[in-house]
Amino acid sequence: MKKLLLSIAMTLVVTSGLHAMSRSDIAREITSALGNLQLNALDPRESVAKQQTAVTNWTNAVDKAKKFVVENSKDLLKKVDPDLAQGLSKLDQLNNDFTNTIKTIRGTMPNAPISKLLPISNDAKKLGEQFRSKSFVLSGKKDAALLISVVAECIASGAKYLYNDLLSKKR
């Protein structure tokens, strides 16, 4: 009996540590993918394959974040939190708009519609601020909300950076 209780306690300790580590690992991967995206996604000196790889790496990192949010957005009764579900839906739409806009800009250079990046940046910034101000009791939900905020803020800063970078190259 003691061995069973000890193994259950160890599992809980390891699992709770993995969730916190996973969130920070995912946030670090998102930040890294954003840096790569900013440097390579629209750089005309880079091959199309390298540009596409930057977008793919970003998408993969965001997918990991979305999976983490889905896994941690449930309460003790396994009911999905409506605020987190709605935030994830908005985040998914913003990310689709962001990556599709990057692809459109890349395909229509030098007369690219870079102004499409500004509304994406503004909407993502609002979503990030909204989830920074939310409070949850369960640590999993707190981590999920923080990750939504991190991804949204990365989309906002990435879209703004790419807009300013492309604008400076047009002049």
Image (cartoon, rainbow, N blue to C red):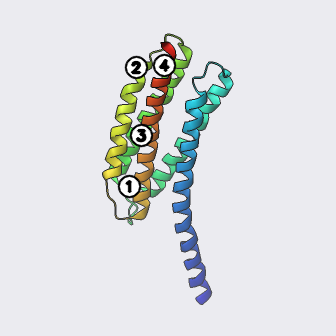
For residue 1, say whether it is visible: no
Gap between marks 1 and 3, in whole Å? 16 Å
Kindly identify which numbered label has been placed on residue 91.
3
| Residue 138 as seen in the image, left or right of residue 33 | left
Asked if residue 60 lies left or right of residue 146, the reply is right
Q: Earlier in the sequence, mark 1 or mark 3?
A: 1
Q: Is residue 44 left or right of residue 116?
A: right
Q: Please, what is the three-letter code of the amino acid marked with disc 2?
A: Ser
Q: Quadrant of residue 5?
A: bottom right
Identify the amino acid type marked 4: Ser
Above or below, 64 relative to 20: above
| Among the two numbered marks 3 and 2 on one chain, the one whose residue lies closer to the N terminus | 3
What secondary structure is marked by label 3? Answer: helix
Which kind of residue does numbered mark 3 sit on? Leu
Question: Please, what secondary structure does the residue beneath circle 2 have?
Answer: helix
What amino acid is found at the position of numbered circle 1 in the picture?
Val
Q: Reading the chain from its start, which is encountered first: label 3 or label 4?
A: 3
Mark 4 secondary-structure assignment? helix
Look at 59% across and 30% down and name the residue there: 39
Foreground residue among 29 and 68 = 29
Which disc, if any, is residue 115? 2
Indicate whether 5 appears above or below 88.
below
**Reading the chain from its start, which is encountered first: label 4 or label 1?**
1
Indicate which label's residue lies in the foreground, 1 or 3: 3
Residue picked out by circle 4? 168
- Residue 152 pos. (x, y %): 42, 41
**Comparing marks 4 and 1, which lies closer to the viewer?**
4
